[in-house]
Image (cartoon, rainbow, N blue to C red):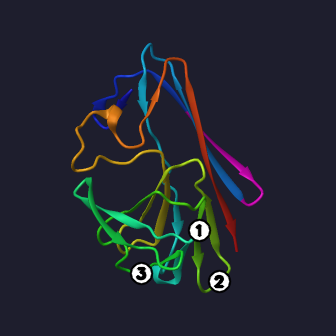
Amino acid sequence: MNLHGGVYPFKFTLLITFTLKNNSLIQSYRVLNTDTKTIPVSFGGHPAFNANPIGDFEIYFESNESIYSNILDGPYISNQLKPIIVDNKISLDLFTFNEDALIFQHLQSKWVKLVHTKSSYAVKVDITDFPYLGIWSKPGAPFVCIEPWQGLADFTSHNKDIFSKKGIIALGQNQEINRQFSMEFTG
């Protein structure tokens, strides 16, 4: 399989399923190792939601979080942190994503919710199956992405060994992994 101009040198099957159930959309991932050796596996979602104008939206976390976001250094994650969540929410504005994505590790919350402050519109994203969360928007864009992630981009200090990458799952021969997240829409 050719990915981004390079070659991923492992054999696998990836099945992504979308299921509509009442006012929810469920996205499921199933990865099967069809190779004769252990393969490194990671994946994540990239759903984007209407957030226009962005200043009319907030993101709520299920739990009271005292979490900082990692800061990006080019395409890499640095060890620098900045406080983001105040009283279990992020109030979005035109400057929230000026330094790129917000990257969260060690969350207690099993869901996050994008809420329009001037209506009943909201989307609740269940992130139970995923250890990391990215929240991102292109500055000035009319959307925000809430991204459940299995793994993270490389840290600036990473040794470039894919098997030691944060969040990588070493999937043995003939093994499989399943994960899902749901998006519940109201309003």
Q: Amino acid at mark 2?
A: Ser
* Above or below, comparing residue 74 to residue 154 in the picture: below
Residue 95: x, y in percent?
34, 78
Outermost residue on the top side: it is 36
Q: Amino acid at mark 3?
A: Asp
Q: CA distance from mark 2 to mark 3?
A: 17 Å
Q: Are marks 3 and 1 in contact (CB under 8 Å)?
A: no
Residue at (59% x, 75% y) in the render: 115
Q: Quadrant of the N terminus?
A: top left
Q: Earlier in the sequence, mark 2 or mark 3?
A: 3
Residue at (35% x, 29% y) in the render: 2
Where is mark 3, residue-wise? 93
Residue at (29% x, 69% y) in the render: 99
Q: Nearer the viewer, residue 154 or 18?
A: 154
SS for callout 1: loop
* Above or below, comparing residue 170 to residue 80 in the picture: above
Outermost residue on the bottom side: it is 118
Residue 3 shows in the view: no
SS for callout 2: loop
Q: Amino acid at mark 1?
A: Ser
In the picture provided, is 181 more to the left or to the right than 3? right
Q: Which residues are magenta?
A: 15-23
Q: Quadrant of the C terminus?
A: bottom right
- Would you call the spot at circle 2 few (<14 residues within 10 Å), some (14-19), or many (20 or more)? few
* Above or below, comparing residue 179 to residue 149 in the picture: above
- Would you call the spot at circle 3 few (<14 residues within 10 Å), some (14-19), or many (20 or more)? some
Where is mark 1, residue-wise? 63
Where is mark 2, residue-wise? 119
Asked if the magenta segment contains residue 19, the reply would be yes
In the picture provided, is 97 more to the left or to the right than 129? left
